[in-house]
Image (spheres, rainbow, N blue to C red):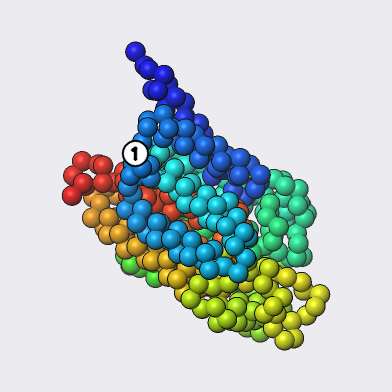
Amino acid sequence: MATTKDKIVKICDRVIEVSLYGTAFYIPISNALISIFSSLAIFSWVVKKIALRSRPKDIFYPTFLRGPIFLFLATMIFSFVFSGYHLMSLRHFFYKTFKYAVFFFVIAESLDRRILRNILGVLVFSASLTALSGLHQFYRGKDFLRLRTPVIHGRINGPFYYPNSFAHYIVSLFPLTVWLSLIRYRRKAWNFILPVLSALLLFSLVLSATRSAWLALLALVPFAAFTQGRKFTLCCVLIVALIAFLGPLMPGLAKYRIENFFNYREDAPVFDRDFLWKDAFDMFLNRPVFGQGLGTFMFNFQRFRPQGYPADWGISYAENTFLQLAAETGIIGLFGFLYLIVAMFYFFLRCLKACPDKKYRHIGFGLAGCMVTYLVSSIFVSSFYSMALAFLFWLLLGLVAGLHKIILLEPGNNS
């Protein structure tokens, strides 16, 4: 007979599972619902730990990324300890950074084969719906998820505020649909549906006319060469060549951006980034070790505003995740983050190379590809300072840790 503790744990597990699906689905749609579902997952996880009377060492699941995550959090603590605005940094640490890290552990602990399959399905469905919404916006004037109109004529932003955020989201999930389409499914319909969805995401990405996301897409070519071999790499190269060849036929700003792909100096937003990157770099040089303080970039913006920066542009993020992280947390914080990334790729790819199950290999390489495109695109977007894009990163990282656990638990893979 089930005890009260068993019933509580079972309820918490179910709430966590549903909350993870909700978070994954609403990432491109609603910050409020992302916050609600993620908070519900974390709250249920805490209740479960209390019910189980978990010892301190057993609270955080011993994933292969637990050490790098703790190191990253430690560097963030240094940042707010040495911050010039302690309360602001402390608030940012607990309400954002620490919450994201706990959310990662909730995913890593909760994931099993069934939940993994369902979350991947939710992510692909949500990304496809977002891409369709963007196309509807391009041809009908409004997206059907948030009823938003294009911010820039000739480009699509879908349910997001800006085209860059839309493109960053799409390109970060495009590799997942591509690698999932390599799996041979019992239901033959999926062997047709997934390539079609990949093409849908690719087309919406082209219409976003976001060259930073296109650069992230190009980064998949060497990644494919490393993970999949010559045939798959050749297909990637041919697709890129086809898009470039069809550039003059593309509607909206996509045609101009493809034809002038390397001519960045004619693009006003590039000059914008010139100013923003200089502001961030000067901020970093002012306090290179511990930075200005976690979450204080916007507050310090005016102090380091570069000469010639137009007054009507207002305060902005750095439009570079790594540079903004360096400005706020210094070399210490940037090292903590880069160590986490390097550890993730090194141990996860080693695990995938040794895994005999092709299905898991395809899923794993798809998730790793998502991290590649996310990080490359983050060079041009302050992705950690958007709730939707920040949760997407930690969700993908949690799925990587969860899949790593699943592979090791499979018979013959636990060496």
Does residue 383 appear in this view?
no
* Camera-side residue of 104 and 176: 104
> Residue 288, image x and y in percent?
51, 78
Q: Does 114 sit above or below residue 158?
A: above
- Residue at (69%, 45%) from the top-left corner? 145
Horizontal side of residue 346 vs 206, given as left or right: left
8 over 62 or under it: above or below = above
Is any atom of residue 27 visible in this view? yes
Relative side of 313 to 194, left or right = right
Who's the residue at 52% across and 37% down the image? 43
For badge 1, the amino acid type reads Arg
Residue 196: image location, x then y, percent: 52, 50
The quarter of the displayed image where residue 354 is located: bottom left
Nearer the observer, 342 or 198: 342
Q: Which residue is mark 1?
A: 55
Q: Number of marks in the image?
A: 1
